[in-house]
Image (cartoon, coloured by chain):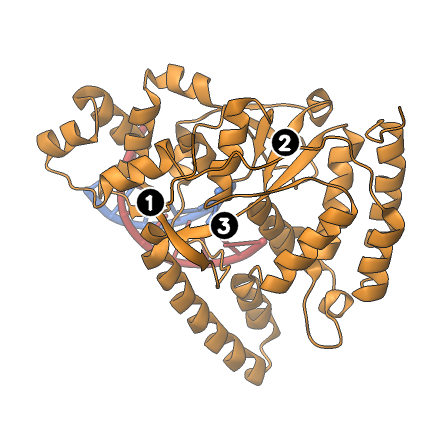
Chain colours: A orange, B blue, C red
Amino acid sequence: MPVTADSVEAGDSNPFGVLLRLMGNADLRDIAVIKDVSFEELGGSIVAVDAHNWLYRYLTTTVKWTSDDIYTTADGEEVANLVGVIQGLPKFFEADVTPVFVFDGAVTDLKDDEVKRRREQREQYEEDLEAAREEGDAIQVARLESRTQRLTDVIIETTRKLLGLLDVPIVDAPAEGEAQAAYMARRGDADYVGTEDYDALLFGAPYTLRQLTSSGDPELMDFEATLAEHDLSWEQLVDVALLCGTDFNEGVRGYGPKTAVKAIREHGDLWGVSEAEDVYVENADRIRDLFLDPAVTDEYSLETTIEPDLAAARAFVTDQWEVDTDEVARGFERIESSVVQTGLDDWT
DNA sequence: CACATTCA
DNA sequence: TGAATGTGG
């Protein structure tokens, strides 16, 4: 599947990086076949991690409980991501799981409206935040800060740099990282897609791991089992999502997961439903295509032998960025011992 | 996105 | 029971 630039806004590398979610598709959870797995049984596998999703997860949950000044440099640059990376990687290494971080490329123009809405929303939050700071309302400040959290260029760049020093493979998606990760998994280059996003299912990711950032065991979302469970084709599953709502469209009022599945099965596809039940989904064909045939690339190489330059990585985090916490120190120790023990090192 | 609450 | 809506993270 070649790179198709049709549906991608050329050269527009998401300048906002905002990940405020105005609408998601948690509705898909009710449809998806999900089972619990243990991290141990993933040993030896490769996980294509949706890098933005993973980072965001760390920035909004794990890291935010440490105090700001720890990861804010003298110039006011917030690099909590460095803590997240060092804290999050050991989990993979210790289970002998090789992560591959897939970064987003250009933003799809269909998402323009969405991005615009998010930016406006963010600006509003920042105004409120300023006001809350002036009033000294600490609780409100904390709440709004979590909402304005975003992946800045510095965060993306320093994350990439650090992953590079740790010899963790990186892949650059032409558009959606999620789509690229799913593609790699479908080709068999990765065993799983790692993301919290249910969209992975719509991109046809055979197996998706959720909750990779939390301490418990992950969830496994099974694509084929999901289709079989509801007797749907991939195309039909996407149509179901179009009715419920995706990142690219608002759902049709009155259609949740149950109703949507029922309708699609009854009428075959979205057009059948449109005709029979008088509903309309804007840009349906384009969005459909975005999930079924997204812009992806074969230009990637996966080096599964990880040989981190720990000295350089430590220097980067603690000296250059002056992030020196117990969490970071422990994270490095765990990385050091796990990489050696699990044989991710190439000593042959 | 998860979870709780409310409405039909 | 399922859909819609609001809140917290």
Q: Secondary structure at mark 2?
A: strand
Where does the N terminus of chain A fall, quadrant-wise? top left
Q: Nearer the viewer, residue A94 or A304?
A: A304
The residue to which callout 2 is attached is A47
Whether marks 3 and 2 lie on the same chain: yes
The mark found on residue A250 in the picture is none
Pick whichever of labels 3 and 2 is earlier in the sequence: 2
Crowding around mark 2 (Cα neighbors within 10 Å: few <14, some 14 to 19, many 20+) is many
The residue to which callout 3 is attached is A105
Q: Residue at x 78, y 49 (%)?
A: A165
Q: Chain of mark 3?
A: A
Q: Quadrant of residue A348?
A: top right
Q: Secondary structure at mark 3?
A: loop
The amino acid type of the residue labelled 3 equals: Gly
The mark found on residue A6 in the picture is 1
Pick whichever of labels 1 and 3 is earlier in the sequence: 1
Determine whether A77 is above or below A85 in the image: below
Q: Is residue B8 left or right of residue A153?
A: left
Q: Residue furthest bottom?
A: A134
Q: Is residue A212 left or right of residue A106?
A: right
Q: Residue at x 89, y 51 (%)?
A: A311
Is there any visible trace of residue A221 in the rendered image? Answer: no
Q: Which is in the foreground here, disc 3 or disc 2?
A: 3
Q: CA distance from mark 2 to mark 1?
A: 28 Å
Q: Position of residue A79 (x, y in %)?
A: 70, 63
Pick whichever of labels 2 and 1 is earlier in the sequence: 1
Crowding around mark 1 (Cα neighbors within 10 Å: few <14, some 14 to 19, many 20+) is few
The amino acid type of the residue labelled 2 equals: Val
Whether marks 2 and 1 lie on the same chain: yes
